[in-house]
Amino acid sequence: MSPDSLLPPFTAPYAPDDAAIAARLLADAVMTPAQDTRIDATATRLIDAIRAKDDRFGGVEDMLREYALSTKEGLALMVLAEALLRVPDARTADAFIEDKLGQGDFIHHETKSSAFLVNASAWALGISQRAIQPGETPQGTLGRLAKRIGLPAVRTATRQAMRLMGSHFVLGETIDAALARARAPSERPARYSFDMLGEGARTRDDAQRYFDSYASAISAIGHAAGNRSLPDRPGISVKLSALHPRYEAISHQRVMRELVPRLIALAQQAKAYDLNFTVDAEEADRLELSLDVIDAAFADPSLAGWDGFGLAIQAYQKRCADVIDHIDALARRHDRKMMVRLVKGAYWDTEIKRAQERGLAGYPVFTRKAMTDLNYIACAQKLLALRPRIFPQFATHNALTVATILELDGSSGGYEFQRLHGMGDALYEQLGKDHPAIRWRTYAPVGSHRDLLAYLVRRLLENGANSSFVAIAADDAVPVATLLQRPAAIIGSPDRAGHAKIPLPADLYRPERANSHGIEFGERAALDKLLAEIAASKPDMDNVVVDANAAQACAAVTAARAGFASWSHTPAQDRAAILDHAADLLEQRRASFIALLQQEGGKTLDDALSEVREAIDFCRYYAAQGRQQFGEGEVVPGPTGESNVLSLRGRGVFVAISPWNFPLAIFLGQVSAALMAGNTVVAKPAEQTPRIAARAVRLLHEAGVPRSALHLIQGDGRIGAALVAHPAIAGVVFTGSTEVARSINRALAAKDGPIVPLIAETGGINAMIVDATALPEQVADDVVMSAFRSAGQRCSALRLLLVQDDVADRMIEMIVGAAEELKLGDPSDPTTHIGPVIDTEAKQKLDAHIARMTIEARVHLAGTAPAGNFVAPHIFEFASARQLAEEVFGPILHVVRYRASEFDRVLQDIADTGFGLTLGVHSRIDDMVERVIARLPVGNVYVNRNMIGAVVGVQPFGGFGLSGTGPKAGGPHYLARFATEQTVTINTAAAGGNAALMTGDE
């Protein structure tokens, strides 16, 4: 296709202000009194039908009413549904069932519904809970019951409850079974859109399997489609993230090169059968990428003359109206029609968290449900106005939304409604009776019950909130008038558009401090702007850094000692203000620091931006903590007639020795903490990254730190040793290897004079435990990130993966496949996932370990690295965790399988390493997680997520044993270790008696 056939790339503000959008939507939402009356009448009739419906089998509405997600039973049921059917072994299944059923009261649960689905599920869960009393172990209660009723009976009852639920929400486990069920006789021909269940692809094989599944389904659907014409034909929904293992903004060129031809091939097949072909919606950070893929595929000449190509768009996204404009322009450009499914959105919680983590200016989605509902109607009106070029498909189970669209339509037709299979039956049955010409399509999941789990839980979360229409529509205790309240009335005014309890990402930690500002790589404009700023920075790497000698190191300590009196008497408020100013300067100059981190530290774009943000957070956090801890002192209660005040004050000269793996964040974290506590500092950065430290020191001086209070000494370990040995130092803060930490500790202990503190953070043989309840895709994501991000050069990185043997083959296969998709290369290239290791010495050490492991261990992955200081990801399997005797600081993962019956031995093996920095646990069994936490003395435990990237003030970081001394960096106890404590007691009654006591009121 020619470039002229393509539209300009989609662009719109990523996270615009809610109030501005609300002002426009509220102005456009006004209806006439006659319209409102008709909408009320239609919606009331639909609600009455929902409440009158007595479905003997039951649906998701019945389950939500019976087990609300605001109850313990509802939450336990959700987790059981998500994981139980994928657990292959009996031991883990029994522990999982006990754990979840013990969290609710299923025995005494009195069912409110007469539906078979609800009653059968409640019966099975109640029977199981009677067998598994809370607080008793499978080895106890289940062991005794097995002799009486048989252990399989307990397990089978619960599994059947899950399968019973699943069978109602999936149309068929295969496309043939789904088509057979879809052909069931009905009063009007049913329209279906089939959704092949599954998670996004993590590997190349995953992507091929999903492609083949889609292709087979299109063929089967097409052969069974009959002779009706569009839109009265079946369709299929395709998820782009299922067709590519790196469906992400930074891999844009690769995605366009590899995915677009695949999408075109599937679309050509769908065109051959004249089917509805819908590209499903993805998360907000993938929207621009998705539209680029859709634009390119839709423009292919082979698809001309077909009206079935479509996409889903999400009304909770603030850019929804902009997407509609873009799609209309696309259809106009190619003089073709498109089908557009309007949904409200299914990833709301994920979108909120992602924006907060990235420190964005705002949210890409609305934070109030009423704003989503308001935007849905506005976008529906926009779509209706674009008929017939656009064929709208309104996906909703909300009676008020349906009634409003009917009113806006004006009986012109040319659109359809959509509902999820297993939901909305009563509403749409009544709609069909009242409006025979109105058509609706059923969005029907197809796949195994195991694949259904994530889908089902998402539907429960999406519709189970207390504010959801589906959750409350059938509840007679909720007045119909409540359900008819308009979104515009709920919002009221633009200033109420945002959720009062969800702060903007920048305000997440206020009033204590501001969140550091980041960007979303999925926003093209923001990424391009940052890349341009980085390119313009051009760090000077030719200037020679001169190492200090021992005399210069001694002179620096002497000068710092001379500056201590002045700096320590600077009010804490002033010291904090300087650190806040430094954070602001760093944020303003982040591009130049990112460029230097990439050039000198080998950091990828993502890692470099994250490190700058962490450094900013350290400065602001310690400033905020310092204001609280180093102010006027704490008044201590005591007897009358005296005052007692406990205060903190600086110790003297602190030596800060920082590593090369976080040459800005850890360097500034150490220095800013010591300065905030009133100490002067001699900073000795790693010899591999001297320029980053030098620039950071210049920034601190510019922010207001006196030159007498902060001194920079460059050099290798010998200079560090000379500083540590100086008799005038008052403390050492160190991050690095355990061996060097021991050396520093011995040197400090051997000196005469005051005993000074050592604050050390070292590494560890960091482990992750994965049991059979864990979701493989989530494990793969978290393992790959934890083991290979930053080329494995993080203190917190995953070194040892312990996987339950029942699921190990599948887990390892997916992890290997995902790791194979990572790109190694130039860290200044935004498409790079893994940059180089720090230097030739590090590479040689890692290469030697790889060579030894190739002989001693089973090789699962041996990646290929480009020339230079690159080490590709490697994965080796051991027979025992004890074979890994030391930390391997690079992108090398060691895997050990374990039997569920040997779990205690696994914990002992981890404990015996002596390290205790980070630990990952992937399990849905809370009791198992609690056992691990109680048994292992580890500083940072991460459950069901990755185990790197500790956030300042949120996940204070530091370990036990061989992993460090504590206290935790970025935590509330850190500053106090840099200080001495002083208690001042004053006899306030010394001059003439206790006047305050004697003159006080009774």
Image (tube, rainbow, N blue to C red):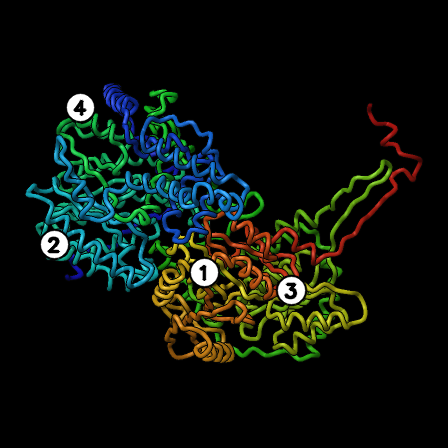
Give the alpha-carbon distance from disc 4 to disc 2, as whole Å.
37 Å
Give the alpha-carbon distance from disc 3 to disc 4, as whole Å.
74 Å
Image coordinates of residue 988 in percent, x first then y, are 87, 39
Dot 4 or dot 2, earlier in sequence: 2
Image coordinates of residue 840 in percent, x first then y, are 49, 80
Q: Which label belongs to residue 363?
A: none
Q: Nearer the viewer, residue 31 or 913?
A: 913
Dot 1 or dot 4, earlier in sequence: 4
Q: Are marks 1 and 4 in contact (CB under 8 Å)?
A: no
Residue linked to disc 1: 803
Q: Residues within 10 Å of mark 4 (few under 14, many from 20)?
A: few
> Quadrant location of the C terminus?
top right
Q: Nearer the viewer, residue 466 or 63?
A: 63
Residue mark closest to the camera, 1 vs 3: 1
The kind of residue tagged 1 is Val
Q: Quadrant of residue 530?
A: bottom left
Residue linked to disc 4: 434
Q: Residues within 10 Å of mark 1 (few under 14, many from 20)?
A: many
Image coordinates of residue 592 in percent, x first then y, are 47, 65
Q: Are marks 2 and 1 in contact (CB under 8 Å)?
A: no
Q: Is residue 899 left or right of residue 816?
A: right
The kind of residue tagged 3 is Ala
User: Residue farthest to the front?
Assistant: 147
Q: Quadrant of residue 78?
A: top left
Task: Please say whether residue 81 is visible from this viewpoint.
Answer: yes
The kind of residue tagged 4 is Asp
Residue linked to disc 2: 303
The kind of residue tagged 2 is Leu
